[in-house]
Image (tube, helix red, strand yellow):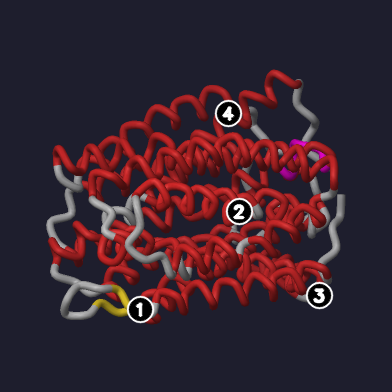
């Protein structure tokens, strides 16, 4: 039994709430990357160790997605969302008061365990509530939260970190999450239509059966590979952008918020427009053209010499638009790769694949570069080349994946 369609106004509120939750979850992950120069200096760690700190969040998120598949179909979506988001808010606050690298690592793992399922859960709710014909636009709204993160979240967080040190952004994020948690508890419908499907509940044997049914389908396996490759394209490069720009290009710390602001403003509008374009023109058609275009900003950004800051802003804005924009049709395609009866288990497993791929790509990217004694980052162009080749492979895999409306 499908989740009943919501009235237009209720659907807009649902998307607004999910986008807000996505904003905090994304910011919690993204804020670590521009804080890289501060944290590496504060704790005296290498880029690889910092990459591990970033990866810890995503690897924990992948593990939690696997665990979530044991219970996610046995409860209403709203109940699971509220429970996980509560733990995420507390864990994020713990990050703010971590006194050492080891404690920060533990807090990041906890935040990843709770927060890692939120994006998957948001996609799952959209897939169950919003018809396929409008799903590209809905995913565009969800992805606009990513843009809003770069427009306001990252610049404000960097400003807070510069005034009150690196702890401040996590305090702000924890309080923002608490407000959105109250809104979700009040505003979201029960979202328990899937509980009426046969086999939605059950013990370990039932979960194992659902896992097997999902994993044995070749189309599902292609969707998992498609997700992993698309995540790998960006995350071999994204976590190390600020380190490279500051060390090699000469971008100053106070200039970074402006770079994120401009890129975020542009992608805030392009994400939703790309969603509409994907619905009108075809999700696969739009995805493939954006995926092909990623090689250009990837290679330019990872080989950028010392140039005026205005050119850095232009290059980074194009990078954000193209690399993040292809995820809008990609998510619509993946969310439609499984039948409704298997979608809960499929999406949680896909979320695990996505988070693990982020962690692996970030860790691999950190080991492809190294910092010389003079402070220069070397080998970053290899990250861009790897990302470009993976983008081509993702197109090939995506063509073999079918969608179920």
The magenta-colored residue range is 126-132
Residue receiving disc 2: 322
Residue 305, horizontal then vertical, whole percent? 36, 66
Element class at badge 1: loop
Q: Is residue 379 visible?
A: yes
Which circle's residue, 4 or 1, is located before the other in the chain?
4
State the residue in front, 387 or 299: 299
* Left or right: residue 354 compared with residue 339: left
Residue that badge 3 annotates:
218
Viewer-side residue, 376 vs 397: 376
Q: Earlier in the sequence, mark 2 or mark 1?
A: 2
Mark 4 touching mark 1, by CB under 8 A? Answer: no
Task: Give the residue drawn at x 79%, y 37%.
Answer: 134
Instruction: Determine the image quadrant of residue 306.
Output: bottom left
Q: State the residue position of label 4.
A: 16
Identify the residue at horizontal 69%, vertical 73% (top origin): 392
How far is disc 3 from disc 1 in space, using C-alphas? Answer: 36 Å
Disc sitting over residue 369 in the figure: 1
Indicate yes or no whether the magenta region holds residue 281: no
Of labels 3 and 2, earlier in sequence is 3
Picture coordinates of residue 75 (x, y %)?
Answer: 62, 45
Q: Earlier in the sequence, mark 3 or mark 4?
A: 4
Above-or-below relation of 327 to 22? below
- Sequence order check: which comes first, mark 3 or mark 1? 3
How many residues crowd around disc 3 within 10 Å: few (fewer than 14), some, or many (20 or more)? Answer: few
């Amino acid at each position: 039994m499908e989740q009943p369609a919501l009235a237009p106004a209720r659907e807009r509120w649902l998307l607004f709430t999910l986008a807000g939750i996505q904003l905090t979850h994304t910011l919690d992950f993204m804020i670590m990357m521009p804080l890289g120069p501060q944290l590496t200096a504060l704790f005296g760690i290498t880029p690889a160790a910092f990459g591990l700190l970033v990866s810890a969040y995503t690897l924990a998120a992948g593990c939690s997605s696997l665990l979530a598949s044991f219970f996610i179909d046995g409860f209403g979506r709203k109940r699971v969302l509220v429970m996980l988001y509560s733990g995420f808010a507390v864990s994020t606050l713990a990050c703010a008061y971590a006194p050492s690298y080891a404690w920060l690592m533990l807090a990041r793992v906890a935040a990843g365990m709770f927060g890692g399922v939120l994006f998957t859960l948001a996609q799952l709710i959209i897939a169950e509530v919003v018809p396929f014909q409008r799903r590209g636009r809905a995913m565009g709204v969800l992805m606009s939260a990513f843009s809003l993160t770069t427009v306001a979240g990252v610049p404000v967080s960097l400003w807070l970190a510069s005034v009150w040190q690196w702890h401040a952004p996590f305090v702000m994020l924890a309080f923002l999450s608490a407000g959105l948690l109250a809104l979700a508890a009040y505003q979201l419908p029960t979202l328990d239509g899937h509980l009426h499907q046969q086999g939605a509940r059950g013990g370990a044997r039932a979960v194992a059966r659902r896992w097997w049914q999902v994993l044995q389908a070749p189309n599902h396996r292609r969707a998992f590979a498609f997700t992993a490759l698309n995540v790998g394209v960006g995350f071999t490069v994204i976590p190390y952008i600020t380190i490279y720009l500051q060390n090699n290009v000469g971008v100053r710390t106070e200039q970074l918020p402006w770079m994120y602001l401009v890129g975020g403003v542009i992608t805030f509008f392009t994400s939703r427009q790309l969603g509409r374009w994907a619905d009108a023109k075809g999700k696969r058609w739009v995805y493939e053209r954006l995926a092909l275009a990623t090689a250009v900003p990837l290679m330019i950004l990872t080989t950028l010499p010392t140039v005026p800051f205005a050119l850095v802003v232009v290059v980074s804005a194009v990078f954000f638009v193209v690399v993040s924009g292809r995820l809008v049709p990609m998510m619509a395609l993946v969310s439609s790769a499984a039948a409704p009866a298997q979608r809960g288990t499929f999406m949680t497993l896909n979320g695990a694949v996505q988070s693990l791929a982020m962690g692996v790509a970030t860790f691999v990217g950190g080991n492809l570069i190294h910092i010389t004694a003079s402070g220069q980052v070397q080998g970053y162009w290899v990250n861009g080349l790897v990302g470009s080749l993976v983008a081509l492979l993702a197109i090939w895999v995506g063509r073999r994946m079918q969608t179920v409306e």
